[in-house]
Image (cartoon, grey):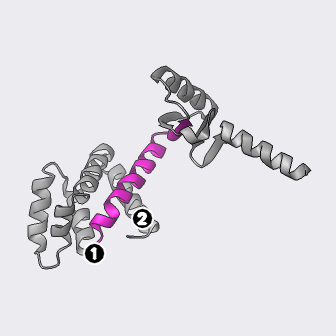
């Protein structure tokens, strides 16, 4: 598995190319298609086989992803030649998504609750976070019964933990310090 830094470097280079060529959305689509294709075990085995000619690998990639752009195909072939397509494709796509969101002023946030939130509740939380951050929020709702109740919100690298579990842990620590 490539180190996280190499996928970030690839994603940054691709983002710079996509931005300069006004192809941000097309590159995003191509990177996701590559990531999906590379997760197919049979295809991955073919692409990683050193006895298969690069031309054959390129032809198969074009057949599997007929809409792939020439730049993304070149990237795929570079990664294939280094034996990194399968290991790096998903990381590059994810890092690219983060850069694209950042470029567009979008912040990803996750909300974890003990019970599912309905669409209205999700929209209300997203609006409150948008007001607090001044940025557009892309919200992902998760359910984790282990938090018992309340809510845990992650925005970027900030965590707001209003869960019952966190409050009980705080109470436990407070009582332990007094004893």
Residue 160, image quadrant: top right
Residue 162 visible? The answer is no
Disc 2 target residue: 9
Element class at badge 1 = loop
Q: Judge whether residue 104 is colored magenta.
A: yes
Callout 1 crowding tier (Cα within 10 Å): few <14, some 14–19, many ≥20? few
State the residue at coordinates (61%, 36%). Answer: 148
Residue 68 visible? The answer is yes
Which disc is residue 90 wearing? none
Farthest residue in the right direction? 178
Viewed as shown, does residue 13 lie left or right of 141?
left
Q: Identify the magenta region.
A: 84-113
- On the image, the x and y values in percent for residue 120 come to 49, 20
- On the image, the x and y values in percent for residue 33 come to 24, 51
State the residue at coordinates (50%, 37%). Answer: 143
- On the image, the x and y values in percent for residue 30 come to 25, 51
- Quadrant of the drawing holding the N terminus: bottom left
């Amino acid at each position: 598995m490539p180190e996280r830094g190499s996928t970030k470097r690839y994603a940054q280079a691709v983002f710079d190319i996509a931005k300069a060529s006004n192809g941000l959305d097309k590159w995003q689509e191509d990177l996701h298609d590559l990531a999906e294709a590379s997760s197919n075990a049979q295809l991955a085995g073919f692409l990683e086989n050193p006895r298969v000619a690069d031309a054959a690998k390129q032809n198969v990639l074009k057949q599997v992803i007929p809409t792939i752009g020439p730049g993304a195909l070149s990237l795929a072939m570079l990664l294939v030649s280094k034996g990194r397509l399968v290991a790096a494709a998903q990381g590059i796509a994810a890092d690219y998504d983060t850069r694209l969101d950042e470029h567009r002023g979008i912040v990803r946030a996750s909300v974890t609750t003990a019970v599912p939130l309905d669409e209205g509740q999700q929209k209300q939380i997203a609006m409150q976070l948008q007001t607090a951050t001044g940025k557009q929020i892309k919200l992902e709702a998760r359910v984790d019964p282990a938090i018992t109740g309340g809510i845990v919100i992650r925005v970027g690298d900030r965590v707001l933990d209003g869960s019952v579990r966190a409050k009980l842990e705080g109470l436990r620590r407070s009582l332990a310090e007094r004893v």
